Amino acid sequence: MGVKSNKMQNNHQQHNHNHSVVVRLNEQMGTKRGYTFIQAYRAWIPKFLMLWVVVMAFISMMIYNWMDAEIKERRKEVLTSMCDQRARMLQDQFIVSVNHVHALALLVSTFHYYKNPSAIDQETFAEYTACTSFERPLLSGVAYAQRVVNSERESFERQHGWTIRTMEREPSPVRDEYAPVIFSQETVSYIESLDMMSGEEDRENILRARATGKAVLTSPFRLLGSHHLGVVLTFPVYKSKLSSHPTVKERIEATAGYLGGAFDVESLVEKLLGQLAGNQAILVYVYDITNSSDPLIMYGHQNQDGDMSLTHESKLDFGDPFRKHEMICRYHQKAPASWTAITTAFLFFVICILVGYIFYGAANHIVKVEDDFHEMQELKVRAEAADVAKSQFLATVSHEIRTPMNGVLGMLGLLLDTDLSSTQRDFAQTAQVCGRALIALINEVLDRAKIEAGKLELEAVPFDLRSILDDVLSLFSEKSRNKGIEIKIGIGMHKLIVTNFILFLSSLFVDFNRYGFVIHNSPLGYIIWEVKLAVFVSAKVPDIVMGDPGRFRQIVTNLVGNSVKFTERGHIFVKVHLAEPSKTVINEPCLNGGSDESVLTPGGRQFKTLSGQEAADERNCWETFRHLIADEEFRSDSSSNRTASFEASDHVTLMVCVEDTGIGIPLSAQDRIFTPFMQADSSTSRHYGGTGIGLSISKCLVERMGGQINFVSQPHVGSTFSFTAIFERCKKTSFNEMKKPISEDLPSGFRGLKAILVDGKPVRAAVTSYHLKRLGILVEVASSIKMAVALCAKNGSVIPGNIVRPDLILVEKDSWISAEDGGLNIRQLEWKQNGHVFKLPKMILLATNISSTELKKAKATGFADTVIMKPLRASMIAACLQQVGIGKKRQQGKDLLNESSFLQNLLCGKKILVVDDNVINRRVAAGVLKKFGAHVECADSGKGALDLLKLPHGFDACFMDIQMPEMDGFEATRRIRQMESEANKQVNGGSPIDGTARNGEWHTPILAMTADVIHATYDECLKCGMDGYVSKPFQEENLHQAVAKIFKSKPVEEP
Amino acid sequence: MDRNQLQRQVALMRSSLIEQVPNPSLPSLKLLVGYLDEQQFLQLEDLQDDVNPNFVEEIVTLFYKDSARLFHNIEQALKSRPVDFAKLDNYMHQFRGSTSSIGAIKVKNECNQFKEFCLAGNAEGCARAFQKVKQEHETLRTQLETYFKLRRQAGLAETV
């Protein structure tokens, strides 16, 4: 049931996980939706553009208007100046002409009237005027008309020989007076004898002229002859000199005639304008505006084209105050559209539009980019989710594959147990091997997927590092043994045959080459399993650490497995020590490493490593190692120092090194060695098999443990993988409680034994002594048998040494053989011993492999029967030693002194109830408790227990199984506690039931007996009122802890 | 001389029963390894003293007697249709408790297998696993019997 609910919980968790992924996805999307300003107002962007365009158009218009006004102003100014200039010139020319006419008038009066007889006749006049006509460019001609009164008409007509005619060239009718032309310039000779007073204009002019005595102009009219518009200028000519201020009457009377000139205004102005620049551009009109309501045009085209919008008027003064003239100028063409203004405004507008468009484009681009960005982000989130989902899928599928595969394997196992022919058996076995490989692969993929899906959770339970390392090592050593270690081949055999034989063997053992057989061309012709496996754990590493033992084991197994796979000779050495950054010894010896650590031997270079082979990382060389050990011994000597540094922090960082002397990793492949499914190269992959996923898993696991993994590798020399991992230190209390169930139970019977270890190789000696020390054996290392003899002799005498008398001597096979070769007799040792002590120490041979002849020889020399085979494990050494007969006796004694005696003290005479439905368990529990002197009663169910525990009772404690039919341990305990509390109430009420109630309170200590030591179970135990729990089957130390706790407060009577 | 030899044989037998790694000097006993949990069995043996000289044997006998009953129950439960897996699990739990008490690792492992099948609701698997359990159970019985016989002989030799 428990397991089932667990599974359901798992499902639930998985579901939760799925759910949480989705939620996380949503959250991510949510948080990433932080829009920018532009993004938020994206709908406004076109509107902004429109607004911008409108505003810019308006501004452009303003600019245009301003520029246009400017231009118009300038145009007006130009017009004004041009008009004024023309007017001034016209006026000047006119005045000049008038003055000349005035001079002519004076000439006529002087030479015609003051001289007598007249000095002028028509001929003279014509000649003179023709000669001086350049002086009067504006006058088409001048003529002199004499004033003739009607009374003088006849005489006048007679004098001249013609009649006075009107303008119409008809004989003039009778009038008061006449003004016939008598002198005329040749250009106007046609007006001779015409009466000037017959023309309305002229008459008026004449009258006005003689009244004022000044030049007088007519209004414009069409001139005779040229049909040009013109005016006639009239000057009076007086007979006599006038007073300075003559009256009008005096003037009229003094008038003798009139000098007139016709101004051809049209040609005049035409000529004038022709002299000026820019006359094409403007139109000029000259008006007589004497009658302001009806201006008379003097010059100008009647059809009023031209620019009507702009005109300029300039006053003209032709010297006649009666007549007023003005000049009006306007441009010939309408003001041309001002291209500057238009282009400026247009260009401005265009630029603004472009700028606006640029901004618009930029905004749109930003929006687009941001949209894309959001989209990408969404895709990224989705992709990540998909990745997680993929990992989850992989995990699920792998898990699902595992289940049927287990069935397949189970069935294959069953099949193998039936009667099969050898072929069938072979097939089935192959299938099983393949199946196992598949399961292993799936497990790895599952691990990988779990890590990727983030589902991998590390446990934090106390565990014994050393026992795990022992297990791992034994796993591989077992494999190595199963392969058969030693094959003898005749001396003369050809090497080819040997190789063929090896190939044959390799076909027998599927993964033969994984375990590295080496052909040795030694004189004896042995093929020897050459790889030495060894483990060494620094004494400073705590016994129990909190962490995930399974994962730790997985990492170490993986690394060691790799090493085994790729190592053919030499050693694989696992070393664990504290990673203390303050320690500098690591680097020091490497400086002088090369020359010091290798000594030349006949067999080639010999290194001071475990096997004598060169290792890639020199950190494991003996020099460093010695420092490590020396440091350790120093530390353990000054225990106060040690504990101080030990208890300082809660965490302990361990450095685990796995050193091998295998083929190494090619330099090119070193950087991708932790990539999943990546092996060093394909050829290696073919040669060695495997998926290459292991290292990447290890890396992940190590990282989850807060450490780092790295390696040093030299091709053809070896690799050293090292990783660090952070574990919690075990608290003292939990340490004691948990120690038994988790740590390997090493027999304690060897404690205090003394041994001499004879080994020439210091690293190997250190490893061996590490294992012996774990058994509590004091070890003295001697590098050779000779030294051991000396040591024994010394200790045998009275001189106090470290070891008074060795209980056993362990001799490494190499040392023994070299001693034999050197002619040293091992019996020497024995003999020396015999001289001094009654019991000779046991001599035990340590070997990786041993041939039967060697074994015989060894026995003959005096070694014990049992050879301790390597790789070493503490428990194996213990077993071997027990086999030889060492430590057995002491063990009992020690036990008595140790926990057993305490238990006996605690339990002796106590009455204890054991409740268990299982008769076997009941018997065993009872047996154990009885052994410690307790009186035991049994109950086979919860109900039975309740009956027995009815108050008052005499039980000192109760051991309660948890899983029982009908009423389980929890329920039974609850009821018992209920009973007790009721009884206690009564006691407090004043009626004590029995004197046996201690301290006036009933509380029978109840300890749970349970097979699973999960923390949750423990919590539940405490919740329902139990006092503790012991693991089932009983383990002494655990039992001791639990019992000590409940009986601690009570005085224990000494037996 | 004879006594020593017998004692050694007992020790070897015991260690071969217990130890996972076969002793290379005893290849013939290779098949018998790993039946018992070292700790538990040694502890049981430790419980023997002058008052209770045959405690282990007693317990083992009890175990076989009890297991016969449980096997019968399990067989009944397996035969019944529909199969009551809760009941099966319960029986097997009891049986497993017993096996772990005497430290019979191999049998216990088979029991675990059985319980797995129980959880999965696989009646067929249960039946197969049960066969396995019985098989291991039987192998262990013969092993233990041999062992006890050796021990008795050794003990007799000792008393003589």
Image (cartoon, grey):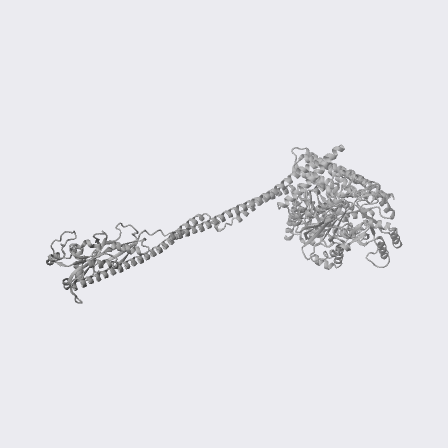
- Name the quarter where the N terminus of chain A is drawn: top right
State the image coordinates of residue A991 (x, y, percent, origin top left).
Answer: 65, 52
Q: Is residue B97 left or right of residue A20?
A: right
Q: Position of residue A841 (x, y in %)?
A: 85, 51
Report which quarter residue A70 is drawn in: bottom left
Total label count? Answer: 0
Q: x, y (%) of residue A284?
A: 28, 54
Residue A423, position as x, y percentages in the image: 75, 33
Residue A976 versus residue A130 in the image, above or below: above
Q: Quadrant of residue A629?
A: bottom right
**Is residue A872 left or right of A98 when viewed as pictured?**
right
Residue A212 in view? no
Q: For this view, does A35 lie left or right of residue A819?
A: left
Could you tell whether A497 is left or right of A20 in the image?
Answer: right
Above or below — where is A706 with respect to B112?
below
Give residue A97's quadrant in the image.
bottom left
Q: Is residue A494 among what the camera can see?
A: yes
Q: In the displayed structure, would residue A60 be above or below residue B27?
A: below
**A534 or A695, nearer to the observer:** A695
